[in-house]
Amino acid sequence: MGERIRAYDWARHPLGPPEQWPGALRMALSLCLNSSFPTAIYWGEELHILYNDAWSVIPAEKHPAILGMPAREGWSDIWDIVGPQFQRVLHTGEGLALYEQMLPMVRGGRPGETWWNYSFTAIRHADHRIGGVFNQGHEITHVMLARREREDELRRWREYFRQAPAAVALLRGPRHVFEFTNDAYLRLVGGRDVTGLEVAKALPEVSEQGFVRLLDSVYVSGAPYVGTGVPVKLRQGSGEGGEDRLVDFVYEPVRDQAGRVDGVFVLATDVTDRARAEHALRLANWQLGEERARLAAMIEAEKRSQQALRRFNETLEAHVKQRTAELSQALDKEAAVATRLRATFDTDLIFQGYLDPDGMVLDANPASLAAIGCALGDVVGREFSETLWFSATPGLAEIVRDAVRQARAGQTVRLEREANLPGGRQLFRFIIRPVFDARGQVVGLVPEALPLGSLRPEAD
């Protein structure tokens, strides 16, 4: 950029030849050109632009034509945002530092979101008059988009956990602050709003019973803790007393990217009803045993009584066994939730994806991406019907768009179609089903395709 500035025909420019430039401008330009940080100078009433090599990537295809250009002309696409910022510095002399500022820059002929951290500092003459603005900054678009993607992913997973039948909570930090609780957990603690509170403050009765010490141990040691049939007294609502419950629970340490424990994942199941049923069964068996011993010496009437009691016992045992099996099955389903969520997209047998309600691709499993030779980033954010899974097959994109519209209306759509893929023409069984939230609203679509076999190319 030093060479470009020296070679520029300044004699025909409003700034004039460099040897006539004021000392403040020459000093600022020296700092600019010798800085490895993206730096630009905006000089004069028109804020003519001078910049260094590190800054040259910021205007993209406008470089190097933007050199010497008035700022209003060079940044016409974002002037409604940065123009007032420039004027504030010029009029007040006070510097500005802006973080995570969105600027809708035009790049490649199209406007798009760009995010920046940057500063404006007044450049003063020796007599303290303001002659221009010294600008430094760097782009953080990739950081903001990654954060947005992570937040979207977290929202999806939070919704999955919110609907889980088992009580789930996520605690953060050494004070065990509630970051997330699902509906089942809130029911377990009597509907108290605990989010953002420490366990010891949100559930004081739990702290008194030693559960906070268990959490401390898990947080410090990094080893999980499993409790089975543990008694706990939980206050329901705002009452002073507590209700005795029995719970199975797991305290699982949560680690950050560096491998350090920064939280505890809680999974709990209220087994009070199951334990009471088991206790009732044991008590009933004991009572029946006593009754059998007392009635053993009785005559026919006693035998009839024993038969009646035996039938009662068998009925009670069958009921308890059935209830215990149902509860065990529910526990198995609860334990399988997380496994299903992790394994859903790892299958090689079918193609799977996840769309927003408008049919834009949010996720796709490796098998489906391999079939079209694409990475996840090539399809995310695109309309499902316009991707390479369908675009090479005449008429298929419109069929898929119609299927998406039906699924968005709450219908599950099934069809069989042929598709031209990079590896050849194949017959698929397609299904697109809606995903509902707790209010019955469609919050996403799940497309799946089962390959039924390759087809020979048609003759020319």
Image (cartoon, helix red, strand yellow):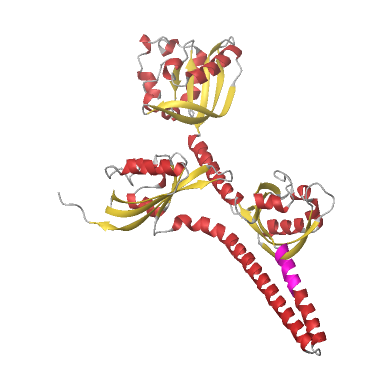
Residue 139: x and y, percent? 49, 32
Quadrant including the N terminus: top left
Q: Which residues are drawn in magenta?
A: 272-281
Question: In the image, 399: left or right of 124?
Answer: left
In the image, 438 versus 150, the foreground residue is 438
Residue 191 at least partly seen? yes
Left or right: 123 in relation to 380: right
Q: Is residue 276 magenta?
A: yes
| Rendering coords of residue 124 (x, y %) | 56, 14
Residue 10 picture quarter: top left
Residue furthest left as drawn: 460
Tally of numbered tags: 0
- Where residue 223 appears, as percent x and y from the top left, is 66, 62
Residue 175 rendering spot, x and y as whole percentages: 73, 49
Q: Decide if residue 252 is on the left or right side of residue 290.
A: left
- Which residue does the image show at 72% across and 59% down from the upper left? 217
Q: Residue at x 33, y 54 (%)?
A: 428
Residue 38 appears left or right of 254: left
Q: Is residue 23 above or below residue 277?
A: above
Secondary structure mostly seen in the magenta stretch? helix
Q: Is residue 44 above or below residue 402?
A: above
Please say whether residue 295 is one of the residues in the magenta stretch. Answer: no
Q: Residue at 41% x, 10% y: name it.
A: 16
